[in-house]
Structure formats: structure tokens, C-alpha cells
Image (tube, helix red, strand yellow):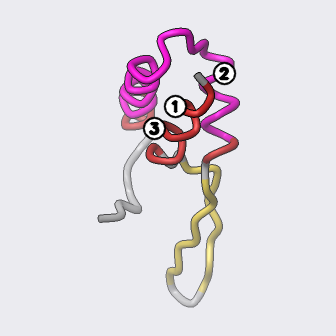
């Protein structure tokens, strides 16, 4: 399911939860490594509305992020 709506108030809890998952995979992760890996594994998505296409990115890809951190240990 893809949610294409939401607000800034959703972003902080989402990022905090994602960081928590990353800490479970790699207890030595730092905020700097988290951001670096999140941006590296993130994706750009396209949303089409009213005959226009909008590109949004970087959108976190939790699966790729976790897999990348597992291999980084």
C-alpha cells in the first residue's frame, strides 16, 4: 500500500522508528551513518495527478536500508 498523503507531523515518528530498527540491526550505528545509508538506499518516486508528474525523493526504503546495514557489520 502506498500512502501519498500525510504531513510533517508524521515524519519525525517515522524516522525515529526507522532509526530504532536500524539500531537493532547494528548497535554501533550513529545518526551520521543512519542518514548516509538512508539517503544511499532511498528512492525517488513519481506521483501523477491531473496530467502532471511529480518526482519526490529521497524516500526511505526500509528494506534496502536494513539489508545494507546488515552487510556493513
Front residue of 27 and 8? 27
Whether tag 1 and tag 3 are in contact, CB under 8 A, the answer is no
Q: Is residue 40 left or right of residue 25?
A: right
Magenta extent: 13-39
How far across and how far down the image is residue 48, in percent? 53, 80
Distance, label 2 to label 3, CA atoms, is 23 Å
* Position above or below: 30 against 18: above
Secondary element under disc 3, as helix, strand or loop, is helix
Report, in whole angstroms, how far the alpha carbon at label 2 lies from the one at label 1: 13 Å
Dot 2 or dot 1, earlier in sequence: 2
Residue neighbourhood size for the residue with mark 3, other residues' Cα within 10 Å, grouped as few (<14), some (14–19), many (≥20): few
Please determine whether, in this image, residue 19 is positioned above or below residue 58: above
Residue sitting at the far left: 1
Residue at image coords 60%, 12%: 30
Where is mark 3, residue-wise? Answer: 8
Real-space CA distance between mark 1 and mark 3, rounded to the nearest whole angstrom: 29 Å
Q: Position of residue 41 (x, y in %)?
A: 62, 46
The image quadrant where one finds the N terminus is bottom left
Element type where label 2 sits in the image: helix
The answer to which of marks 2 and 3 sits earlier in the sequence is 3
Of marks 2 and 3, the one in the foreground: 2
> Dividing the picture into quarters, in which one does residue 69 lie?
top right
- The residue drawn where x is 61% and y is 56% is 43
- Relative image position of residue 16 (x, y in whole percent): 41, 23
Task: Identify which residue is drawn at 70% across, 30% down.
Answer: 36
**What is the number of the mark on residue 33?**
2
Q: Secondary structure at mark 1?
A: helix
Q: Is residue 33 magenta?
A: yes
- The residue that mark 1 highlights is 70
| Vertical order, 1 against 52 (above or below) | above
Check the image and report above or below for 18 versus 46.
Answer: above
Amino acid at each position: 500500500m502506498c500512502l501519498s498523503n500525510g504531513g510533517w507531523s508524521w515524519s519525525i515518528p517515522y524516522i525515529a522508528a526507522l532509526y530504532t530498527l536500524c539500531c537493532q540491526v547494528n548497535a554501533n550505528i550513529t545518526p551520521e551513518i543512519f542518514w548516509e545509508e538512508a539517503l544511499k538506499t532511498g528512492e525517488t518516486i513519481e506521483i501523477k495527478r491531473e496530467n502532471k508528474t511529480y518526482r519526490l525523493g529521497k524516500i526511505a526504503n526500509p528494506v534496502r536500508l536494513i539489508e545494507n546495514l546488515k552487510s556493513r557489520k
